[in-house]
């Protein structure tokens, strides 16, 4: 048996399950913007979630940090600063567009690097989800405000919905009919499953659980695949089948390629996956740092990442 197959076969323990699917609460959704076309392509998705959950949309813009001057000058109050006033006007104009009808909205202006100020905003405003627009640059996916999207979704204490350039094409008629949830059987997938199942229940959507197990020789794939499918099926609580359709899938490609291929083949409307704060180790882990980055930058649908 190959080392990959042996590693998978050795994972024998009580499988975690979601005993009860409770509705997630998204009271406040954070939408960072720099007013560019790239960032605002994520806005319809933020509004869709706000309508779905009756959320308040918190729009935020980060002004550049104060320059370090050799001579200390008196600080101009933010409300008297031209850039601050211009930003407030742009946020107000955006919030008064017809697409915001019926959605409570709040505008914030802060100064500094976005990835540094987001944790404070999340804490102060009790944010339950962040919606980011990204250029989808490979390797280092940079959010349009100049900081790294990857840095944000790996450090944020709440789930992050990232909208890449290919996913933006789905707006404005985007609906959640099918959800792809790649899981790592060797880790505890309960947190990410909770979000995927709750969203599936909210939208009466198909949920597709998948596991990618690379480097398994063909002669061992039948046994490894059968074991994986049983494990995946055991993750779905019995009562969930009353309100959503479920399927399981086992793939042999590299995890990022497997996720993207299944998402394309099944026309997934949303990918829900977990990410680690730092680089993960282990052959079977779905989520070492390049994998989430690849999925976010190349996916043709929004990607909801949940940090574990």
Image (cartoon, rainbow, N blue to C red):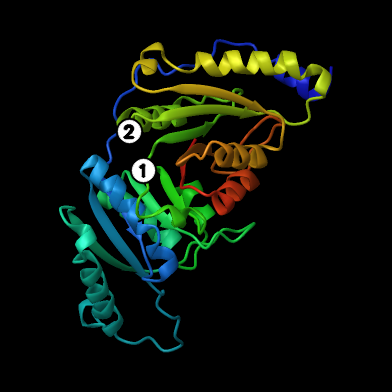
Q: Which residue is mark 1?
A: 175
Label 2, secondary structure: give it.
Answer: helix
Q: In front: 305, or 115?
A: 305
Find residue 250 and report its horizontal and vertical position in percent: 64, 25
Which residue sits at x=20%, y=77%?
Answer: 79
Residue 215 figure quarter:
top right
Residue 28 visible here: yes
Find residue 103 and report its horizontal and vertical position in percent: 18, 53
Residue 12 figure quarter:
top right
Instruction: Please state, as top left, top right, bottom left or bottom right, where the N terminus lies in the image.
Output: top right
Q: In front: 141, or 73?
A: 141
Q: Is the residue marked by circle 1 packed among few (<14), some (14-19), or many (20+) residues within 10 Å?
A: some
The numbered dot on residue 203 is: 2
Which residue sits at x=51%, y=37%?
Answer: 273
The numbered dot on residue 196 is: none
Say whether marks 1 and 2 touch (CB < 8 Å). yes
Residue 306 visible here: no
Q: Is the residue marked by circle 2 packed among few (<14), some (14-19), or many (20+) residues within 10 Å?
A: some
- Give the vertical position of 286 relative to 150 (above or below): above
Looking at the image, the residue that sits furthest to the left is 102
- Give the vertical position of 58 relative to 80 (above or below): above
Which residue sits at x=37%, y=18%?
Answer: 240
- Give the vertical position of 61 relative to 68 (above or below): above
Alpha-carbon distance for marks 1 and 2?
8 Å
- Give the vertical position of 82 relative to 99 (above or below): below
């Amino acid at each position: 048996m190959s080392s990959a197959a042996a590693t998978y076969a050795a994972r024998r323990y009580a499988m975690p399950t979601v005993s009860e699917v409770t509705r997630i609460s998204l009271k406040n959704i954070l939408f960072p913007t720099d007013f560019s076309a790239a960032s605002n392509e994520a806005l319809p998705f933020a509004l869709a979630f706000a309508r779905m959950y009756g959320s308040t949309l918190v729009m935020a813009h980060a002004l550049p940090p104060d320059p370090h001057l050799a001579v200390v000058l008196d600080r101009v109050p933010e409300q008297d600063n031209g850039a601050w006033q211009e930003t407030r006007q742009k946020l107000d104009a955006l919030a008064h567009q017809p697409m915001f009808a019926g959605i409570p909205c709040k505008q914030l202006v802060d100064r500094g690097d976005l990835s540094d100020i987001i944790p404070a905003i999340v804490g102060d405003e009790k944010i339950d989800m962040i919606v980011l627009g990204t250029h989808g640059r490979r390797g280092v996916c940079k959010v349009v405000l100049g900081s790294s999207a990857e840095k944000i979704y790996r450090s944020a204490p709440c789930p992050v919905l990232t909208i890449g350039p290919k996913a933006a094409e789905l707006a404005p008629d985007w609906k959640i009919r099918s959800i792809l949830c790649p899981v790592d059987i060797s880790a505890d997938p309960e947190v990410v499953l909770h979000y995927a199942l709750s969203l599936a229940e909210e939208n009466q959507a198909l949920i597709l659980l998948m596991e990618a197990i690379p480097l398994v020789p063909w002669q061992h794939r039948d046994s490894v695949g059968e074991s994986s499918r049983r494990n995946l099926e055991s993750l779905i609580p019995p009562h969930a089948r009353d309100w959503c359709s479920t399927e399981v899938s086992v793939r042999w490609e590299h995890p990022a390629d497997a996720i993207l291929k299944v998402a394309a083949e099944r026309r997934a409307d949303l990918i829900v996956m977990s990410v680690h704060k730092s680089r993960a180790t282990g052959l079977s882990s779905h989520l070492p740092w390049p994998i989430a980055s690849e999925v976010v930058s190349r996916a043709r649908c929004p990607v909801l990442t949940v940090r574990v």
